[in-house]
Image (spheres, grey):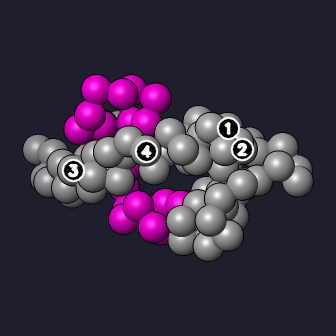
Amino acid sequence: MLMSACDNGSRAWIVVESEQNVLLELWEMNICPQRGKDIPEGTRVGSGRRSEGGFCSLGCYADFYGSDLIECAKRTAALAARPQN
Ligand SMILES: [Zn+2]
């Protein structure tokens, strides 16, 4: 089970790998990293770098990078990397 180190449960699914790998995978899957939902065709926004992710709206982009999500994701990944048993 995926766990988040942060209180925001909506982001709990961003864990396993480094955040850049996650963003790249989500780009390939056309999923917004902030909401975890499909990005409508032609509406993806972001910096233009796939490693920085693509988002379904500028609001999501701002929320994602305006928060401490990256640090949160790193902490979460560190926790997830610990042995569970
Ligand atoms: Zn979004």
Above or below residue 21? Residue 33 is: above
Q: CA distance from mark 2 to mark 3?
A: 25 Å
- Residue at 36% across / 27% down in the picture? 8
Residue type marked 2:
Cys
Give the spatial CA distance, label 2 vs label 4. Answer: 16 Å
- Residue labelled with disc 2: 56
- Within 8 Å of ligand 1, the CB of disc 4? no
How far apart marks 4 and 3 lie (CA) works out to: 17 Å
Are dots 1 and 2 in contact, CB under 8 Å? yes
Helix, strand or loop for disc 1? loop
**First in sequence: mark 1 or mark 2?**
1
Work out which quarter of the rendered image holds the C terminus and state it. top left
**Residue placed under numbered mark 4 in the picture:** 66
Q: CA distance from mark 4 to mark 1?
A: 19 Å
Per the image, label 3 sits on a secondary structure element best described as helix
Q: Which residue is mark 1?
A: 37
Is residue 17 on the magenta stretch?
A: yes
Q: Is residue 25 visible?
A: no
